[in-house]
Amino acid sequence: MRKRIFLSVLVLFSFFILVDRVEAVTEVNSKYNVLLKESVSIDIVKREFDKQGIKVIDTIPEINFFTVTTEKSKEEVKKENNDLIDDILEDNIMTVKPNITYLYGENVITNSNVDFWAHQWDMQKSISTGSKFNHKSSGEATIGVIDSGVTYDNPEIYSNIISVQNFTTDLETGALDEQNILDKTGHGTSVVGQISSNGQYLGIAPGMKIRMYRVFDEGNAQDQWILKALVQAAKDDVDVINLSLGEYLLKDSSDEDDNTALINIYQRAINYAHNQGSIVVASVGDEGMDLQNQVELKNYLGNLRGKDYSQVDGIVQDIPAELDNVVTVGSVDDNDLVSSFSNQGKDNIDIYATGGGSQELSKIGYEKWVAERSYEKEWIIVPTLEGKYTYAYGTSISTPKVSAALGLIIEKYNLKDQPDVATKLLYDNCWLSNNGNGEQIRLLNITNFVQ
């Protein structure tokens, strides 16, 4: 009897030791995004990673980008492969947001019986005559819109979209549903309307062809989705890539939140697109900040992340708007003044276009502003889901106007795959204004591109 008790205790004790050992050696794999050196072969690196127990789970070969999973720390991976890797960072969650604000409600949603042109003061301001557009796209240029998908409720919008590709994946399984292409937010629908709507409601370039790359589902987007869409749009030979989105990232910092690696990955993807002949156009944020004021930017980022960045080294950037080879777009209001919500900065914004304003709103208050329909004079009428239209503001609205103008330039002057020449023509034909601080700014002017 005693032997059985002793044997049972011994077996139980051995079991606990075994369990303890199993728990001790069990580690959770981490997921990293890796930017390889441009000179190395991704096939050679993949074989080397396999030997080290680093599993490659995704890749963007055009920019030497891997997503990997491993038990090792990113410091270990970088140290062991220093000759192969430029940058490495932990895989992130959805952080990129679209830049638009809608004014929904029965009082402000309109219908297709409206005399749209009379209310499209933003479009009127883009041409010197103010007269209703009679120009059309020739069909030779294509705009790639990286956004929230397509709606089939508004033929003026979907009839110009020649392809849709989904890049959003299930956040738990990583599965990609290629059929998941519908716009659930209205953001992509509004953006396309600014570019190519061809009916009673008009975009800057009526009838211009659109390729949609879906990176927003119902909320924010992951950086990997946007990076893949950028590369795919360039491979699809689109002439202009519209990015009405962005995020704030910390660069060149010794802090643990440093995002220099991610910024470098974005820059490589944008350089790839530029080298393929595509013009990348991106909106600045809608936080009304001066992008040259690092105190303001760090305070804002700190509030977002619940952390004090005031003493952190490095700089905060509005990405992708502030990267090289990007046409950076801000917003002006109905008085051609920089919109109160639009980020600005003397050396940060390339061009401004109408995106709405709120001067009257700030003077008379929201209730009176709505009751007197003042939003019709300050905000922009945009198409949204279910074939409806509403009023909105944001740099997401000003940016596609610039993308469309570039499409018109490429068509008129036969500038396919000449992004720098087309961009210079855009800037050379702008109206000039000032930002209220005595500094000169460019305003979108399409007059010479439609005659």
Image (tube, grey):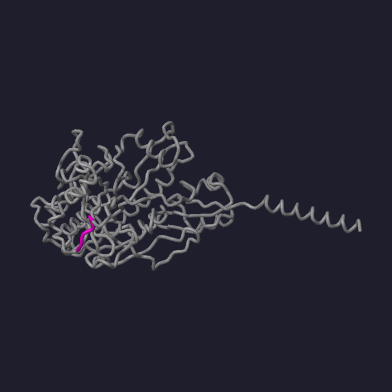
The answer to whether residue 270 is seen in the rendering is: yes
Q: Where is residue 33 in the image (x, y as percent from the top left)?
A: 47, 51
Q: How many marks?
A: 0
Residue range corresponding to the magenta coloring: 107-111
The picture places residue 2, in percent across and down from the top left corner, at 91, 56
Q: Position of residue 36 (x, y in %)?
A: 46, 51
Q: Is the magenta stretch mostly helix, strand or loop?
A: loop
Tell me which residue sits at (42%, 47%) in the image. 262
**x then y, percent, for residue 241:** 29, 56
Q: Which of 15 and 392 is in front in this view?
A: 392
Residue 178 against residue 330 in the figure, above or below: below
Front-lying residue, 307 or 445:
307
Q: In this view, does 394 lie above or below 152?
A: above
Examine the structure image and report whether residue 4 is included in the region drawn in magenta.
no
Q: In which quarter of the image is the N terminus?
A: bottom right
Residue under the point 34% across and 43% down: 318
